[in-house]
Image (cartoon, coloured by chain):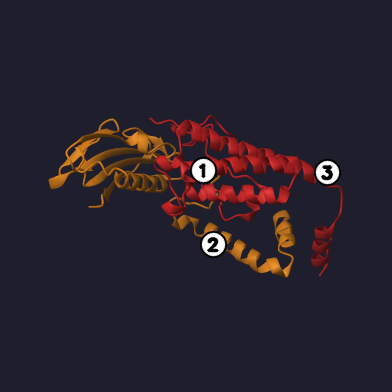
Chain colours: A red, B orange
Amino acid sequence: MRLDSTLRRLRDEEGDTYLLALVRIGFGLLLLNEAWLATTQLRDAGYFGGYFHQSFLPDGLVPSVGVYQGVLGVQFVAAALVVAGRAARSALLVAAALLVYVMLCDRLWFHHYVTPWRPSRRFSPSRRVTGNWSSVGPCGSPRGQSGRRARSARRSP
Amino acid sequence: MAIAIVAWTVCWTSARALFCAGFFGVELLLIATAGTRADRSYAFRMFPESSTITVHLSRRLDGGKVARVEGGHWQARDCAGAVHSFQWGAMVRLPAPGWLDRPVGAPYGVESEVERTRDAMRWVADHTPEDCETRALVAQVEATRNGRALEPIDVEVARAP
């Protein structure tokens, strides 16, 4: 019962929202970065549907190149709204939903431990694979994959 | 503990409780069963395997003859007799096994990368309707797991007739 009341108190606690705003802006910037990485991939490697991709969805639900460009545009707008604090909750939900959708369309570009079924994506951008997988690092990992985004490696051999 | 507190707080109201129970239940199930999937998806692997695979691709032609794909490139005739060129690397790109005859990293494990190779072969087989000669794509995969060589793995994907 004490745990119960403690949890209730934590849940209903009121305070300064300054820190929350910082977190929101941080996530917004990460979402912007995610949209930028996807745009870079589209520009350098081309539309993912044009070559081998691993999709959880049937082909009919994978967006065409035009629709995909629209999705990226919406991701940019949603991320900007999150940073600006305008309709931030809705924008977070839209950005997260689009990320999940893109992951379902092609999971090749996302690390295996990313769980698409995570509504908490609303609060955390996913991690896109950007390391050079052709260049095997000392531990079999792609160079530049050690938690830090590296130069995109989307080149045809 | 912090995660539990957050989770409990989110799941506080009864309206959300059912959804949250289902959600966390599915997550736990996915994590618990990660080892049964070739690609170990939904499970975090702190340290990737120091493994590689080398894919040697061939084409099975009429009569069972096998033609090696050299340099990731081959030519085949369509059903009207016109010659077309095909490039593996243009259809399969990294981080999938986009290079043939040279090692590519398999940080998620050999099984995962072999499955990707099989999926890639199936995609290529399904997306090269101009190739009326190839009956199946055949690959021999040489693999090393954490530096130790494994038995070669044979993969064959038949094309739809």
Q: Considering only vertical position in the picture, is A152 above or below B155?
A: above
- Identify the image quadrant of the C terminus of chain A: top left
- Identify the image quadrant of the N terminus of chain A: bottom right
10 Å neighbourhood of mark 2: few (<14), some, or many (≥20)? few
Residue A60 shows in this picture: yes
Residue A95 coordinates in the image, percent (x, y): 63, 47
| Residues tagged by mark 2 and mark 1 found on one chain of the structure | no
| Residues tagged by mark 3 and mark 1 found on one chain of the structure | yes
Chain letter, disc 2 residue: B
Mark 2 element type: helix
CA separation in Å, label 3 and label 2:
37 Å
Residue B83 coordinates in the image, percent (x, y): 20, 34
Front-most of residues A144 and A126 = A126
10 Å neighbourhood of mark 1: few (<14), some, or many (≥20)? some
Q: Considering only vertical position in the picture, is A122 above or below B148?
A: below
Q: Considering only vertical position in the picture, is A118 above or below A134?
A: below
Tell me the residue that label 2 is attached to. B29
Marks 3 & 1, CB-CB < 8 Å contact? no
Amino acid tagged 2? Leu
Mark 3 element type: helix
- For image coordinates 53% across by 29% down, the residue present is A151
Q: Is residue A12 left or right of residue B116?
A: right
Circle 2 or circle 1, nearest the eye: 1
Circle 3 or circle 1, nearest the eye: 1
Task: Say which mark, if any, is on residue A18.
Answer: 3
Mark 1 element type: helix
Amino acid tagged 1? Tyr
Task: Say which mark, if any, is on residue A145.
Answer: none
10 Å neighbourhood of mark 3: few (<14), some, or many (≥20)? few
Tell me the residue that label 1 is attached to. A68
